[in-house]
Image: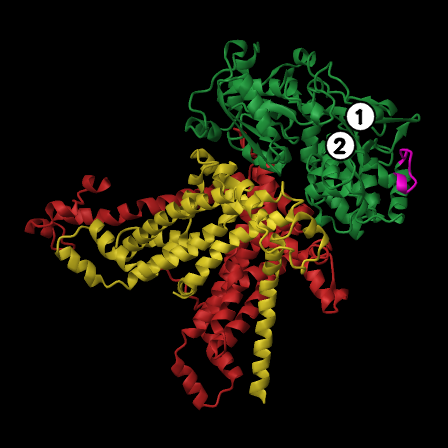
Amino acid sequence: MIRAATSTVKYVSLVLASIVMLLPIVLIVVGSFKTNQEFLTTGPFTAPESWTNVSNYATAFTRGGMMRGFVNTVVIFGVAIAGTILIGAATAYALDRFRFAGRRGVLNLFLLATLVPGVTTQVATFQIINWLGLYDSQGALILLFMGTDIISIYIFLQFVRSIPRSLDEAATIDGAGHLRIFFTIILPNLKPAIATVVIIKGIGIYNEFFLPFLYITDPDKRPISTALFAFKGPFGSQWEVISAGVVITIVPILVLFLFLQRFIYNGFTAGATK
Amino acid sequence: MFPQKRRRRYVSLAAIGTVLTLAAACGSGSGDEPTTPATGADAEPAGEITVLTWRTDLVEDGTFDEYVTAFKEKYPDVTNVKVEGITDYEGEVKTRMNTDNYGDVLAIPGSVTPDQLGDFFEPLGAQDELGEEYRWINDKSFEGLSYGIPVVGNVQGIVYNKKVWDAAGVTAFPTTTQEFLADLQSIKDAGIEIAPLYTNYKDSWPLTQWDGARGAVTADPDYVNKMTQTDTPWTDESDSGVIDGLLYDVVAQGLTEADPTTTNWEQSKQLLGTGKIAAMVLGSWAIPQMAAAAEAAGASADDIAYMPFPAQVDGTFHAVAGGDYNLGINVHSSNKVTARAWIDWFNHDSGFSESQVGLSPLVDGPVPAALQGFVDEVELLTMNAAPAGKESLFADIDTASGIVTTDPKYRQKIVDDARSGSRTKEQVLTDLNAAWAKGRAEVGS
Amino acid sequence: MTTAATGLRGPTTAADTPDARAAREPHPGGTGGARRRRRLVPYLFLAIPVGLLVLLTYVPVVNMFWYSVTDWDGLDKVKTFVGADNYREVFTDPDNVRVFWVSLYYFVGSFVQMVVALYFATILSFRIRFKNLWKGILFFPYLINGVAIGLIFLNFLRPAGGLDSTLTAVGLESLVRQWTGDPDIANVTLAGVSVWRYMGLNFVMFLGAIQSISSEVYEAAEIDGASRWHEFWFIILPSIRPIVGLSLILAISGSLSVYEIPKVMTDGGNGTETFVMRTVWMAFNRGMVGLASAMAVVLLLIVLVITWIQRLVLPDDEVDLA
């Protein structure tokens, strides 16, 4: 009896939660197929006259610069992730495999930095970026993404410990230098950590709004999030086009999610519990 | 042509922080050659420039593409004019001005104080000389030099849907704010879908348009200058008090949109055109946009009309005529010759001011037909420049007071308070006066 | 490359000669030169990471403290020292104080979010049908771009939009509100959107932690006749304590750094301005870098103090980097 009741509560709560999670998204999809007149005159639940009306998508793609936004995001992601991996792994390698003067200090420096939320320091970071001549360039984002990611370093540090030291030692006996050990032993053995970082970081970069909003003004250099934001002004009276733009940003991440579910979950749980 | 130019640039460079100059030296700009001095006639416009504009709608509909094509026809050596339309123009350009990267030609943001002009913008000429050719250059001049030329002249008032007002039985311009409120009420009673008056609260910049009535209420071209001389500019009779008091009253009496946080600028054009809202406080530059939106939505462009701010002095309406945004040249621009050519071309040859139903910025420019009726009934006045040596006094007090009249935030707060009733109108005006007095004390005027 | 200059010979050139091996021997038996080289190695590996850390985190923090006691406008060559003036203004200007209160809404929201996440993580850790489907639905919103989420909810919450229609359809018209327009609930609405967005992340983290509990523990509990509630209280909750602690820290710094959802949805109108929005506006639009820095310093100190308190309360939290 009680089991059955709790079971009902369980399923009812899951169904309700699913509605809450999905309804707002479903309605924007519905809206994206409507014409301007339809959008203004019909209710949000009314199905569009034609489900094959893709003209809003065409408008969003061509005039909203969504394609360029995707390309820019991919470029920024590619460079930043490579940098993050090298930096994280190098830091972890140095801190775990060597004992040297100042090691404790460096550790503390990284630990303390985890407590500084990045957004709070942008007032001052802005001046540094500007001084480097990187304002309004993707370099600014790349530098900030790879230079301030302490969580990744932390993840690498956890994983590097689990690589047996005997591997390094064997390689040393074979005459390998530290660089070679780093590239042939440490990096390949860090694959699970790299997967975790790629996923966490990838989602972070794809979703990042504040930094590109602050640092990138040239429409040709915008990543997807600010490209979508820029939509809002000129298309303010055409919500069906805005809706299409929103759907366009959701679809790629949905596809990736469906294919990589397990890795994504593992990425987050590994990143959090390691 | 501009004798003081060179010296001026070094002065301004010196005034900018070392950080900025360093960044400039690093070559963050897009230019591929060192700064070309704007030597006027002997250099031909060539190469590439970037133009920043607040008219995202004209970028969107291709009008700017046509401008660029025409400009390049006139100056074949110009390879590219990159036009960037910016929705949150004031906010974003202000941020960009913390760096060197803010285009070659841009509209000078309203919040740039006169004493900062030289740090950011290239002088375009001596004020008295340029004044013979262009109107309304006083705003963007400092110590005898002009830094910006208005793209178009506006008169300031209220754009409204004539059909809706007629249907509610209101045919004459209201002469007092009380009458205006009563008229809006009868429009509301006659049944209107959204609201008699629309604030455009969410986009927020339209709230700064209310400032256009400063000077018109008391027909005093020195009103803004006089604000620097008093601790209480927000009284029941003063322009500021009447304007912000009216804003409070319309909102408190429920004559504006029910949920201001969901307003939408692009949509407001349609709503006015189709009579779902009856009026908006905006400069005359808004007329053609509203008319176009009305037509696009299947209504008639003829329904869109213009009225003065509801206040009379000796039985006459007054309206302030002045420049819209002023185009200026980035002092860090690497192609100032072409930038200057763009400004001159834009004012003389582009046809922009005619298409925008504005007053021409040229001294001998014509009055557009659509405004002729308004101009006949209303006496236009031009605000006087600040006295020499006090050009930035107003801005200094404004900033120090924390009110920042160029920023819509304080009016958003008036709307908030009027809706929630957390402050009465008297309290709002008293608080503004107190802040202003504090600002004056700090600046030491 | 730096390797040649510092004696870290390329692996192919000398790898075969026996004395080269000896020279690179890391143990104390090696030659003096090799030891010196070995001592240099970690510094070389750390040079770039630490350089970036200092340049992009510590220099800004130090500068921020310095700017915060000046009246700098972001451009002027001269930064006039003004002492504690900026700090005084942070705490006396009601508009500045208000943003602190606004972040409380998000902080409370993140508690709600953790409770909901814990509930779903618990029920999904037991046997249940369509487990992966539920899990996917609950988690997916976290992957959506924040701007897209803002727009989705602008559409959903607009007057006569999705939410209003739903409420009307199920007979709850009386609950219809101006979701962002009513000053009493605007921040609640925005915090709710934030819960919608981040709940999935908490949920997946909690679920992962619960699933890492060995099944023997449950079996032992079952033999002892423990109820589901007991299992939750005595097995699940204790074992996920570290992750709850971590989520708590994230919740605090997260609620103080809220930006994009209110930026997209209300742009700070109607009393929804957040800390970051105000700081950015002050620094870049109003040119008051000094005051903005003072606000940022205050924010930083709050985060540090709360983290410190959290450490005192939950000392076993796993944050040991070494």
Three-letter code, disc 1: Leu
Q: Is residue C37 above or below residue B293?
A: below
Bin the neighbour count of mark 1 within 10 Å (Cα to Cα): few under 14, some 14-19, many 20 and up. some
Q: Which mark is on residue C305?
A: none
Q: Which residues are magenta?
A: B166-176
Magenta segment: does it hold B173? Answer: yes
Using the image, name the chain to which the residue with label 2 belongs: B
Q: Is residue A236 left or right of residue B244?
A: left
- Measured as percent of width and height from the top left, residue A114 is found at 44, 54
Residue at image mark 1: B371
Residue at image mark 2: B287
Q: Is residue B408 above or below residue A84?
A: above
Q: Is residue A204 left or right of residue B109?
A: left
Q: Is residue B217 left or right of residue B18?
A: right
Mark closest to the chain's N terminus, 2 or 1:
2
Three-letter code, disc 2: Ile
User: Which colouring convention does the figure follow?
Assistant: by chain
Could you tell me how far apart the alpha carbons at marks 2 and 1 are, in whole angstroms?
9 Å
Chain B, chosen colour in render: green
Chain identifier for the yellow-coloured part of the image: A
Instruction: State if disc 1 and disc 2 touch (CB < 8 Å).
Output: yes
- Measured as percent of width and height from the top left, residue C160 is found at 72, 57
Q: Looking at the figure, which quarter contains the C terminus of chain B?
A: top right
